[in-house]
Amino acid sequence: MSQAILFWCLTAAQALLVAAMALAAWRAVRGPRAQDRVLGLDTLYLNGMLLLLVFGVRTGGSIYFYAALIIGMLGFAATVALAKFLMRGEVIE
Amino acid sequence: MSVADLPAWACVTVGLLAVAGAALSFLGAVGLCSFKTFYERVHAPTLGATLGMALIVAASILFFTLVEGRFMPRELLIGVFLTVTTPVTLILLGRAALFRDRTEFAREKGSEEG
Amino acid sequence: MIRALLPHPLLALGLFVTSLLMSGSVEPPALALAAVLALATPQVMRALDAQTIRIRSPGAIVSLAGCVVVDVLRSNWAVAAIILGRRRHERRSGFIHVPLDLKDRYALAVLAVILTATPGTLWVEYDSATGRLLLHVLDLVEEDEWIRLIKDRYERRLMEIFE
């Protein structure tokens, strides 16, 4: 019984995170300006990372933790590079 | 302890923590879509990046600690990492937006005068 | 001697704990790897010539951390209420200027992280010549109230810690 509660709670959490990713993707596609798109991408990877953590709890495997860590690092680097690009028009000065 | 022997209180706590964190994160994404200006939207993702993330990380730590039978604070790394990096990206984005707004404003003003 | 081995003690400690968390055990191999990382990596920082952090009062760190946790919880609640559409009409957001007396670079970095990580406030721009900070606030009720809050709750404690 309690296993069923855990299962449905995790399913609900995953559904909410996927919905959040969809909203962030909508903002990234919609714009209206470049900084809105970058912000949308930032939120997208953040929610993707949280989704992987919930996946990890659901399957009990530790591989999802490392995947989440890598997404976090790459997402951070990507957003910083994009923000830099918006400010100056080039990534490497 | 395997997942099947988890006590009822642990299942309920882990589940509720995960749902609460995901709900906060979802609320942040709703804010991202519903706010009218960029500077308001920048505030929305911090919901998921602070408390939402903390709740999901807590759920994960509790779950793995009980399943493995020893304290597993591994997910704290993600918590610390995200707490340090999210402000950096948001500050940079805010500055970039301000810079773009200023140059655009200056250009409009210049074209009106010229 | 101890300075040559550990130029940045806090960095070394952080690396040690991070490495142990990554390997997820406290067996001898994991401890050895963590010790190697903690001793070798700060030597790289030598080339960067970074200032060492001096912490004056460790007790203030605890009170600052407690303050931040309470504020993060409270402002999460406040921003969630705004998104859910309460008080949609009278809310206005805007920029405020905060005059800061804080000069230490690390203290300013910590303040930037705290202010931005708290939902509802965003650190935008800091002018080190005048010490003026441009802050964006989502729910701007009273400008002076925000300035007082930042100065009382964070700046005073940060000055205790770093200066």
Image (cartoon, coloured by chain):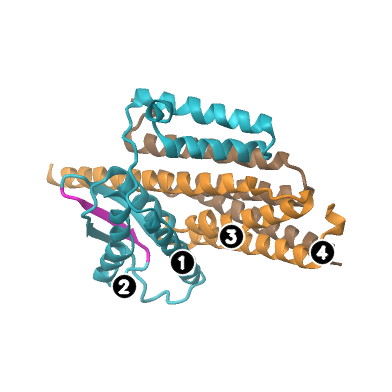
Q: Are marks 3 and 2 on the same chain?
A: no
Chain shown orange: that is B
Q: Nearer the viewer, mark 1 or mark 2?
A: 1
CB atoms of marks 1 and 3 within 8 Å: no
The spot of residue A61 in percent (x, y) is 76, 43
Q: Of the residues tagged 3 and 4, which is closer to the observer?
A: 4
Q: Locate residue C68, reporting x and y percent.
A: 43, 61
Residues tagged 1 and 4 counted as in contact (Cβ below 8 A): no
Q: Report whether C18 appears left or right of B101.
A: right
Which chain: cyan?
C
**Residue highlighted by disc 4:** B7
Callout 4 secondary element: loop
Q: Return the residue nearer the eye: C95 or C145.
A: C145
- Judging by the rendered image, the residue that carries numbered circle 3 is B26
> Position of A24 compared to A16: left or right?
left
**Marked residue chain, label 4:** B
